[in-house]
Image (cartoon, rainbow, N blue to C red):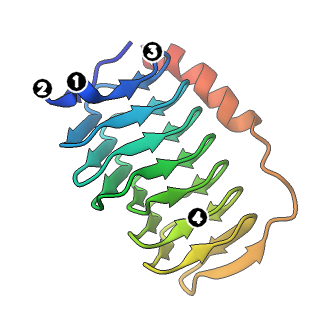
């Protein structure tokens, strides 16, 4: 059930029928937005395709007040099984799969995040910075450590299954 506020010019978007876009979420901008299967956009989530298209993979969870912005003429790509927590901001056009962006974290335009990473709460990844696969970035000094075990996807799979039942 889609209940998003969508502008009239959103006819070029490709949103899989299984995607849950909750009330007060917003898809905006002059370029198409593609969202893969089983993705959920919580209330107040905003996705802006201002200067280029956005392609979001499958099984992603965008929590309240998360913001995704494409301000380049290139296609922004966000992989599969990502969790973008409350208030996180993504401006990078290159986001891999199976990442967690904790509350209030941000990834700037010109930065890149690989696969299986954790960007800690309130951590800012700056333009020109690349977070390699299997890395956790944490703390005010943006310290990095390797992640030695693969993310257990059971948590996001459970959330993606349970949330549609709870939200409607």
Q: Residue furthest right?
A: 148
* Circle 2 or circle 1, nearest the eye: 1
The quarter of the image holding the N terminus is top left
Q: Reading the chain from its start, which is encountered first: label 4 or label 2?
A: 2
Image position of 160 (left or right of 27): right
Q: Secondary structure at mark 3?
A: loop
Q: Which residue is mark 2?
A: 8
Residue 111 is tagged as none
Image position of 158 (left or right of 40): right
Q: Reading the chain from its start, which is encountered first: label 3 or label 1?
A: 1
Q: Secondary structure at mark 1?
A: helix
Classify mark 3: residues with Cα within 10 Å, few (<14), some (14-19) or many (20+). Answer: few
Q: Secondary structure at mark 4?
A: strand
> Residue 146 is drawn in which quadrant?
bottom right
Labelled pair 4, 2 in contact (Cβ < 8 Å): no
Labelled pair 3, 4 in contact (Cβ < 8 Å): no
Q: Which residue is mark 3?
A: 17
* Circle 3 or circle 1, nearest the eye: 1
Labelled pair 2, 1 in contact (Cβ < 8 Å): yes
Residue depicted at x 43% and y 57%: 88
Residue 113 is tagged as 4
Q: Which residue is mark 1?
A: 11
| CA separation in Å, label 2 and label 3 | 19 Å
Q: Reading the chain from its start, which is encountered first: label 3 or label 4?
A: 3
Q: Residue furthest front?
A: 74
In x, y percent, where is residue 71? 27, 60
């Amino acid at each position: 059930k889609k209940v998003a506020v969508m502008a009239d010019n959103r006819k070029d978007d490709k949103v899989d029928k299984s995607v849950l876009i909750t009330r007060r979420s917003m898809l905006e901008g002059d370029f198409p937005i593609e969202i893969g299967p089983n993705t959920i956009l919580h209330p107040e989530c905003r996705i802006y395709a201002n200067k280029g298209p956005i392609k979001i993979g499958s099984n992603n969870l965008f929590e309240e007040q998360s913001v995704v912005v494409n301000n380049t003429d290139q296609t922004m790509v966000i992989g599969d099984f990502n969790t973008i927590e409350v208030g996180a901001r993504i401006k990078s056009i290159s986001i891999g799969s199976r990442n967690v962006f904790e509350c209030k974290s941000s990834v700037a335009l010109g930065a890149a995040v690989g696969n299986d990473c954790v960007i800690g709460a309130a951590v800012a990844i700056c333009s020109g910075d690349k977070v390699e696969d299997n890395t956790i970035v944490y703390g005010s000094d943006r310290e990095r450590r390797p992640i030695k075990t693969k993310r257990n996807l059971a948590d996001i799979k459970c959330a993606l299954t349970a949330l549609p039942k709870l939200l409607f």
